[in-house]
Amino acid sequence: MDFLQRLARFLDRPLFPWKKLIVGFSVGQYLLEAFLGFRQYRVLQQTKPPKVLEHEVSQEVFDKSQAYGRAKAKFGAINGLYGQLQNLAFYQFDILPKLWSWTGGLLLRFAPARFTGEISHSIVFILAFIVIHQVLSLPSSIYHTFVLEEKFGFNKQTPKLFITDMIKTNMLAFVLAPPILAGFLSIIKKTGSQFFYYLWMFGAGLQVFMITIYPIVILPLFNKLSPLEEGKLKTDVEDLAKKLKFPLHELYVIDGSKRSAHSNAYFFGLPWKKHIVIYDTLIEKSEKDEVVAVLAHELGHWSLGHTTKLFGITQAHFFYIFSLFSVFVNNKSLYTDFGFTTEHPIIVGFLLFSDILGPLDNVIKLLMNILSRRFEFQADAFADNLGYNNELARSLIKLQIQNLSTMDADWMFASYNFSHPILSERLKALNWQPTKKVETKTADKAEGKEDVATATGRDEL
């Protein structure tokens, strides 16, 4: 496109302060998110539940939910600062060109000559980058899992399982990243200035491929999927799927309880072959009709075309990203300002371009959250129209106490961060009129304490 080529020439200006611009974007985003986090923290200091829920929420559960929210907020603030300092250090000390030079040296010393080109070099560079990121993020991951989540009764992981998961995740990265990166870079190198069309088609094909292999190859590495046993729950779900003409292939129960006490349900698969997955924790802590109501909500997303629309939006987003990347892929001033004076690696250009795109991505994130919250209301209404009003409302309330989710939220924080409405909004939309308190067992059940409590809040559906 002539417009993109003219824009590329306009932006490729010698001595343009790209590093300062990207650092400014990074710091600006951090300050914005810290400000929103501070606003939300004030809400989490409230001592009474929202007025609309005060007759349904016990003080004990509300206090525990608020404490969990504050703990996550403090962790998020510290972890955000830690991440920001990492970013600034990478920019200030020219870590990217140093890492590129070091990985190039490894290839020259240990790899055959045919594996010393840009594609092989880029693969080794990205794998080294992944390992560095893994090491730097390890302390926060350990704290989040074994301190924060443990304190509130959610963590079920053992150190052995934690380490095993980390090893498997890195093995997947080392297996999948090389061919994907090789395809990505080969397309750009061989298709010229119009590469974004072909890259977009490659991305769409890759997404379909990953959807196909996920239940067969990836998911079994981390969780055990068992067919849902015969009984009323299975019969009711199958009847619901037939009624909606949902192409159900298999109903699974996933052993989510081996890592966490959180609950959820979801579906995945190709358009003609879908799988429904229910967390064992959801089945354990809910009535059968409440589980069916949760799935009625999930299938509402499918029936209303939400999944298709989101897939289409994702493809449009990919096209916009690759189109804009064509403007920066040969920007010599960008590479030079980050220490790449003699080499201009495409993969480094893409990493830097991703940082430049940050502000636009935040706007898109905000718009996607608005759309997502609208879809959630529509899916709730869909389940309501199927006759699951009371069951859905009760399940949402139970999920609140099981997940200790946010009961109230600052409107600015929620708009920027939440893809789901908070529970008070969803119950209001359902015209929920409680006749008695909704009882549910807390996460302490896993430790042998069957405390009965009542709560509402933001769920994970």
Image: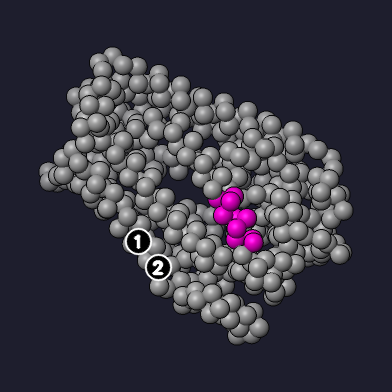
The residue under the point 31% across, 16% down is 16
What's the residue type where badge 1 is placed?
Val
Q: Residue beneath label 2, please?
A: 270
Q: Residue beneath label 1, please?
A: 208
Left or right, 146 with reference to 7: right
**Looking at the image, can residue 106 be seen?**
no
Q: Position of residue 193 (x, y in %)?
A: 18, 38
Q: Position of residue 251 (x, y in %)?
A: 53, 76
What's the residue type where badge 2 is placed?
Leu
Q: Position of residue 454 (x, y in %)?
A: 82, 58
**Looking at the image, can residue 45 be seen?**
yes
Is the image coloured rainbow, by chain, by secondary structure, or in one colour?
one colour
**Which numbered marker is on residue 404?**
none
Residue 239 belongs to the span the image colors magenta = no
The residue under the point 74% across, 54% down is 428
- Sequence-first tag of 2 and 1: 1
Q: In which quadrant of the rendered view does residue 395 lie? A: bottom right
Q: In which quadrant of the rendered view does residue 283 lie? A: bottom right
